[in-house]
Amino acid sequence: MRAETRHQLKQDAFSRVTIGAAEKTAHWSVEHRNTLAVAGIAIAVIIAGVAGGWYYLGAQNEKASFEMTQAVRTLEAQLRPPGAPAQPGVPSFTSAKERAEAAKKQFQGIEDKYPHTRSADMARYFLGVTSATEGDNAAAENHFKAVASTGNKELASIAKLALATLYGNTSRTKDAVALYQDLINKPTTSVSKVTAQLQLAELYQTSNQPLDAKRLYEQIKKDNPSTEAGQLATQKLAELK
C-alpha cells in the first residue's frame, strides 16, 4: 500500500471543517486510491463536519467525540525514520503499521465503550482502515461491510468506497465494479458521482480494460468541463493513447 500523499490534512476534526471540504477531499482521494490509511484521516474530517451536531447531544456522545478526536490525531501523527529519537511532547511513530496499531486500540475502545453513538460507527470504519494498513484484509472487509450497512448514508457511502478500493487492490475486480456502480447510481455528499466514476475508470485502467476506462473518462470529461475532474479525465485519456 502506497504511503505518499500531496496533502497534509491537519485540521482539527471538530472545529475547522465545512461540508465543502468533502468535494476537495473526494478529488484528492481519487489521485491516491490505494492510500486507505491517509484517506481515512480526511474522511474523519469530512464526517465530523457533516454530522458534528450529533456528537454533542449527550454526555456519552461528547466523551466519544473527544476520544475520536484523539484517535484520529494518533492516526495522523508524524512518522520518524527508524532509529531517530522521538521529540518530547510530539507523538510520532517509526512506521505506518506501528501508528495503525496504536490508533486501532483507541478506535476499538470507542466502539466498546460507546456502542450506540455516531462515533462508534466512525470507529468501526477506522478499524477497517487500520486493519487494511496492517494487511488484515479479511478484518478490514468485515468492518467496512458493517459500516456500509448502517443507516448513516454519508458514512455508509464512504465505507463502500473503501471496500471497493480494498476489492480492487486484492484482484476482486467484479466486486469492486459493482460497488462503484452502486455509488455512481446513488451519490452522496461524501462520495459524489464523479468521484465514484473516476475511481472506477482508474480500476478499469489498472485492470487492463482500456476500452472501458476510455469510455468512462470520456463521459467524465463531457459531464464535467472546466473542472478538476474533467482535467484529470483529459490527462488519463492522454495516457491511454
Image (cartoon, rainbow, N blue to C red):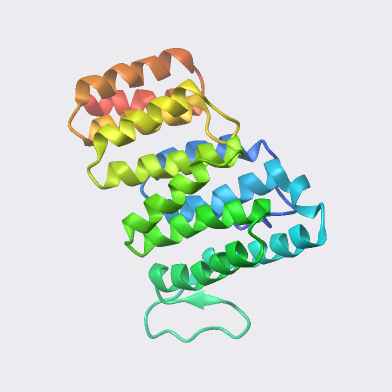
Residue 7 visible in image: no
Q: How many marks?
A: 0
The picture places residue 210, in percent across and down from the top left corner, at: 20, 25
Residue 63, quarter of the rendered image = bottom right
For image coordinates 61% across by 58% down, the residue present is: 10
Residue 152 visible in image: yes
For image coordinates 71% across by 59% down, the residue present is: 65
The answer to whether residue 186 is above or below residue 41 is: above
Q: 193 and 116: which one is in front?
A: 116
Q: 191 and 7: which one is in front?
A: 191
The picture places residue 74, in percent across and down from the top left corner, at: 56, 68
The answer to whether residue 208 is above or below residue 59 is: above
Q: 211 and 127: which one is in front?
A: 127
For image coordinates 41% across by 77% down, the residue present is: 94
Decide if residue 214 is on the left or right side of residue 188: left
> Hey, which residue is sitting farthest top in the picture?
222
The picture places residue 103, in percent across and down from the top left corner, at: 52, 68
The answer to whether residue 231 is above or below residue 133 is: above
Look at the image and tell me in which quarter the C terminus lies. Answer: top left
> Hey, which residue is sitting farthest left in the picture?
208
Look at the image and tell me in which quarter the N terminus lies. Answer: bottom left
Residue 67, quarter of the rendered image = bottom right
